Image (cartoon, grey):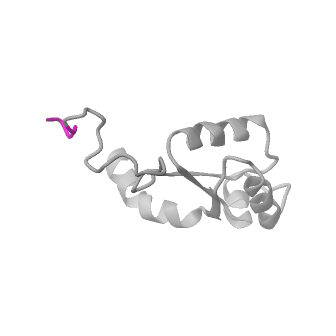
Amino acid sequence: MNGQTPEGNGYSMSESSDNGKRENPIRVWCDGCYDMVHFGHANQLRQAKAMGDYLIVGVHTDEEITRHKGPPVFTEQERYKMVRAVKWVDEVSYAGFMHNVLNPFVNIIIL
C-alpha cells in the first residue's frame, strides 16, 4: 500500500479530531542566524509554517555566527525577539543542538 491508508492521505492515524486539529500535530523545524531579519526570512518562515501545524525556529548563537560568518549585527537575545515577533513562528529555540543531532547523518551522506 506504499505507506498510504485506504483513504490515500498518507496518514496512518485519524487525520483530525472533532475540533479540526490533528491528533498528532506536524512540527516543522527551521534554523538560521536571522541577523538583520528581512522579507526573505519572513517568507521562508511563512512557507515552513504552511508545511505543518507548529513551527519551531532555531537561532544560532553569537559565537557560531562569528565563527562562520563574522560578528553579528544584533545580539542573540535581540535575534530571538525578532524571530519570535514573526507571526508564523510558534517557538524559538537554540539552533546548535539540532546540528549536533544531525551531524553524524550529514557526514554519512557526504561520504
- In this rendering, would 110 be left or right of 25? left
Which contiguous range is marked in magenta? Answer: 1-5
**Horizontal and vertical percent for residue 46?**
64, 39
Q: How many marks?
A: 0
Most foreground residue, 8 or 70 = 8
**Horizontal and vertical percent for residue 24?**
40, 56
- In this rendering, would 16 be left or right of 27? left
**Residue drawn at 20 percent across, 40 percent down:** 3
Most foreground residue, 93 or 36 = 93
- In this rendering, would 87 be left or right of 78? left
**Horizontal and vertical percent for residue 41?**
71, 41
Question: Per the image, is 3 magenta?
Answer: yes
Q: Main secondary structure of the magenta part?
A: loop
**Residue drawn at 73 percent across, 57 percent down:** 84
**Horizontal and vertical percent for residue 33?**
70, 53
The quadrant in which residue 104 appears is bottom left
Quarter of the image containing the N terminus? top left
Work out which residue is located at the far front of the displayed protein and give it: 18
The quadrant in which residue 11 appears is top left
**Residue drawn at 57 percent across, 41 percent down:** 48
Work out which residue is located at the far top of the displayed protein and give it: 8
Work out which residue is located at the far right of the displayed protein and give it: 73
Most foreground residue, 9 or 56 = 9
